[in-house]
Amino acid sequence: MMGHRGVRLGITHMHLTEMQIRAILEAAAELKKAGKNPKPEVMVPVTCTVKELDFVKPIFDKVRAETGFDCLYGTMIEIPRAALLSDQMAKTAEFFSFGTNDLSQMGFGFSRDDIGGFLQHYLDDGILDADPFQTIDQEGVGQLIQMSVEKGRATRPDLKIGICGEQGGDPASVDFCFRCGLNYVSCSPYRVPIARLAAAQAAIKAKK
């Protein structure tokens, strides 16, 4: 997620941002007319400052008014700077979703493109206890997540927070997210049964 991607692309090519938001809200409005109950959320990706969210927000507001369909406006927390400044991000964002794959990638300075070339050596030699792209590094990346949750909710107590990424289907990661107070986890379809079971186990454990 480094380079000219995500919100940066949307800011330099604003017509793309408006087109994408309009596609989401118009589709939702059509579904509602058809008797369905869509609940979309517009999530701005790869942000590192609340000023990016503030820059895009007027476009979101314009399209929302024109389509007559309301929804939450939030951001993906996948850059360490955004996690550290979550109290500011929450002034505009109504929800956070931690992009744990990219937050891990930038937190470690690893690339998912070539980690396979040395990961097994790190695991065999005890340099890493586990693949950080399969289970959340609670000691390091986990600190960023915990701090972000606390700072974000200090600004907006009802802030909705979750994660998306492969770690969302990892039992240890789901338990960690539950303890951090997250509202949900998102993962690949085939991991959903495991995630549901892990969430239930975490909830039961908390009541003991």
Image (spheres, rainbow, N blue to C red):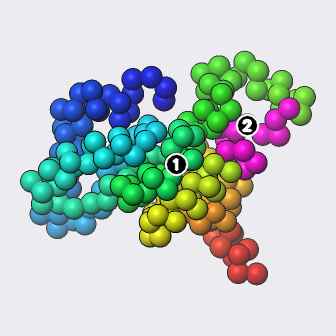
Q: Position of residue 72 (x, y in %)?
A: 32, 59
Residue 78: say if magenta: no
Q: Please report the residue visible at 69 percent of the width from the left and 69 percent of the height from the top.
A: 201
Q: Amino acid at mark 1?
A: Leu
In the picture, measured across the screen, residue 51 lies left or right of residue 79, that is left
Amino acid under disc 2: Asp
Q: Quadrant of residue 123?
A: top right
- Report the disc number at residue 18: none
Residue under the image location 35 percent in, 35 percent down: 7
Residue 96 seen from this side: no
Q: Secondary structure at mark 2?
A: loop
Q: Decide whether the magenta segment is chiefly helix, strand or loop.
A: loop
Quick one: SS at disc 1?
Answer: loop
Mark whose residue sits in front, 2 or 1 = 1
> Which residue is rendered at x = 61% and y = 27% of the image?
112
Residue furthest left in the image: 66
Q: CA distance from mark 2 to mark 1?
A: 27 Å
Where is residue 33? Give x, y as percent. 12, 63
Farthest residue toward the right?
Answer: 125
Q: Residues within 10 Å of mark 2 (few under 14, many from 20)?
A: some
38 relative position to 3: left or right:
left
Magenta extent: 127-141
Q: What residue would you read off at disc 1?
A: 85
Q: Quadrant of the C terminus?
A: bottom right
